[in-house]
Image (cartoon, grey):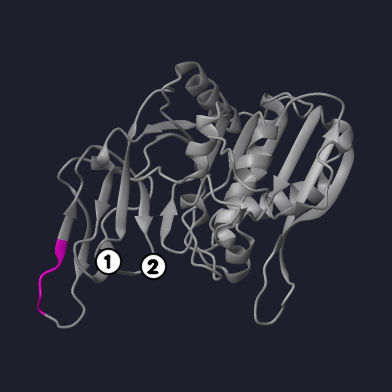
Amino acid sequence: MLTTGLRPSPIIPSVDFDGKGVQHGHLRLPYSRDDSAWGSVMIPICVIANDYGPTALLTGANHGDEYEGPAALFELAQTLDPSQVNGRIIIVPALNYPAFRAGTRTSPIDRGNLNRSFPGRPDGTVTEKIADYVTRHLIPLADIVLDFHSGGKTLDFLPYAAAHELPDKHQEARCFDAVAAFAAPYSMRMLEIDSVGMLDTTVEEMGKVFVTTELGGAGTASAKSIEIARKGIVNLLRHAGILKGGLNVQATRWLDMPSNDCFTFALDDGLIAFARDLGDAVQIGEIIAQVYPIGKTGIAPIKYRAAMDGVLAARHVPGLIKAGDCLSVIAAITEKP
């Protein structure tokens, strides 16, 4: 989804995307504010290139309170030997850098949700300008895009890599082959609640291979989830022919989100008490959780039941929930797409 007839992006890169070796720099976005009249948002970027081959774009912190991707990507940028590369790797560990610095899902500057702002605008808000630069200047360079996600502060997920159902079945198959190569403990055929404005959709509409993840969450990153991200990156780059070496493929359990029955949303505020943990099997009609009103004792909780068979793939955190919050996600066990 390339935008045409737009003014140039105000973002200025300090790296040469055609250069060889390892470059560490910034995407500098001018941002005039009270404490810095000619200030800028400085988004870290690394480019590692050697010989000729495909290009991978690796991004984290599209939402600023999701940490597995940034942890693995900052490490990769520091440690990867360019002699092992055939092609180019563009690493942006904290894509929504203002949100990442603040530890929030959305930007503290404009409250922008970057993953609902694509394809962006060069004359829009700070968040829209970042989205526009990614759309018009980074994605066109890439053959494969990996965008790390987890549950942030309000959800916790089974650790999975994922791709989407696509109209182009050849492209879809390439995406799911890349998911299989990532080799997370779980692999998901993912359904989005609303795909409008997502990086995912923008990349897919350009015909690229796109892989995303949900690797835990709850506002932190565990040693295990970071290791899944670290191994997954290496596997994916080797699968794409960009990094030398063989895949370290481990068994993955394939899941599917076949319909909106996967999602359960809270109908009222209260204290949530789960009856199932992540990864537990559930059957249609079984209680997933109860939500207790907290203003007075003696009031019966609302019972939330599974609308389908499967496993509990995501759950709300922390213990209090508000009406409209996603309470849980159930995924169906399936074979590889």
Instruction: Give me the residue at 15% from left, 83% from top.
Output: 296
The amino acid at mark 1 is Ile
Query: Measured from the top left, where is residue 228 in percent x and y?
Result: 60, 44
Q: What distance separates the C-alpha of mark 2 from that of mark 1?
A: 9 Å
Q: Is residue 165 left or right of residue 263?
A: right
**Would you place residue 126 above or below residue 178 in this image?**
below
- Earlier-in-chain disc, 2 versus 1: 1
Tell whether position 121 is magenta: no
Residue that carries the numbered disc 1 in the rendered image: 272
The numbered disc on residue 318 is: 2
Res. 79 visible in picture? yes
Query: Measured from the top left, where is residue 290 in percent x and y?
Result: 20, 62
Q: How many numbered discs sit on the rendered protein?
A: 2
Query: Measured from the top left, where is residue 175 in percent x and y?
Result: 53, 26
**Would you place residue 161 above or below residue 13 in this image?**
above
Q: Which residues are magenta?
A: 298-302
Tell whether position 301 is magenta: yes
Instruction: Give me the residue at 58% from left, 28% from top.
Output: 208
The amino acid at mark 2 is Pro
